[in-house]
Image (cartoon, helix red, strand yellow):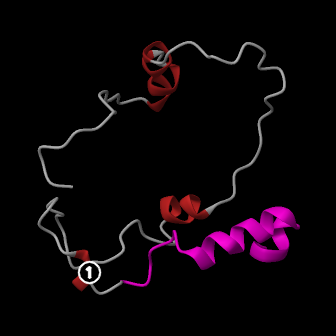
Amino acid sequence: MQAPATSPWRTIIVSDDAREILASKMTYNLNEPSKIQNTSWIKPTKYVGVWWEMISGKRSWSYTNEFPSVQLGITDFSKAKPNGTHGATTANVKKYRFCCKTWFWRCFG
């Protein structure tokens, strides 16, 4: 994205010790109180999805490698050559959707 830009994220937490970041209450304090009165039904679970592929480096966030800096209103994506590594494709999402309905390791083990 080209600077200047607008983002809802307005904090940065920096530390020499990762434990201090985990112990920080900054993000908690910036959030509004939960609108859900009874949260007892919320249970921790595992996540499987296309975004994990991109975070782990298996896929990329970029549709193309042709534009190192996107200029809003100027960059013409219609002429871009796909890099073939973008993870959020219809086929990839369908693969994860199928695996979530069946046994996960059958698809990824």
In the picture, which quadrant includes the C terminus? bottom right
x and y, in percent, of residue 45 in the image: 77, 42
Say which residue appears at 42% left-offset and 29% top-offset. 17
SS for tag 1?
helix
Left or right, residue 59 beside residue 37: left
Residue ID for mark 1: 78
Left or right, residue 45 beside residue 15: right
Say which residue appears at 29% left-offset and 87% top-offset. 81
Kindly indicate the quadrant of the structure image that contains residue 2: bottom left
Q: Which residues are magenta?
A: 83-109
x and y, in percent, of residue 55 in the image: 49, 58
Three-letter amino acid code at the position of disc 1: Ser
x and y, in percent, of residue 18 in the image: 46, 32
Q: Is residue 11 or residue 109 the one in the foreground?
A: 11
| 4 vs 97: above or below | above
| 98 vs 24: above or below | below
